[in-house]
Image (cartoon, rainbow, N blue to C red):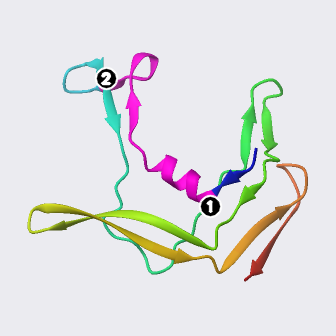
Amino acid sequence: NDVDVQRCLDAYLQPELLVEDNQYYCSTCSKKADASRSLILEQIPPVLNIQLARYVFDMATFSKKKLATKVRLPRTLTVPTKQADNGDSNHTTAKYILCAVQNHLGTSAHGGHYIADVL
């Protein structure tokens, strides 16, 4: 059940449907309505820093819990972008090369050490 950073990024950039119990509240209409929410990267930085939330709130214990799922790191990461060009929209991609990783050492969300590995 490993997780891949590329798949996480692709899923994060997919439109999210806000329906049923998760409808969007429209302040103009003063009511909830179905909607979609998405993130579009119009410009990308020369260096991309991604931070994964590796902790969850455990409702049973009312505390933070560190996730133990392994995360696979590809050597290259493909990032989709949308650029405006004379009123039309172009979809392009940018490639990033993995050059460093920061890891948390420790089993608890409340303690441990962070170390960096340069590749």
At 33% from the left and 70% from the top, the residue drawn is 43
Q: Tell me which amino acid carries mark 2.
A: Asp
Quadrant of image for the N terminus = top right
How dense is the environment of label 1, judged by Cα within 10 Å: few (below 14), some, or many (20 and up)?
Answer: few
Quadrant in the picture for residue 73: bottom right
Magenta residues, as a range? 5-25
Q: Is residue 8 magenta?
A: yes
Residue 8 falls left or right of residue 113: left
Q: Position of residue 57 (x, y in %)?
A: 73, 35
Task: Classify mark 2: residues with Cα within 10 Å, few (<14), some (14-19) or many (20+).
Answer: some
- Quadrant in which the C terminus appears: bottom right
Image-quadrant location for residue 85: bottom left
Is 87 located above or below residue 95 in the figure? above
> Residue at image x 49%, y 52%?
10
- The residue at which mark 2 appears reads as 34
Q: Position of residue 111 (x, y in %)?
A: 88, 55
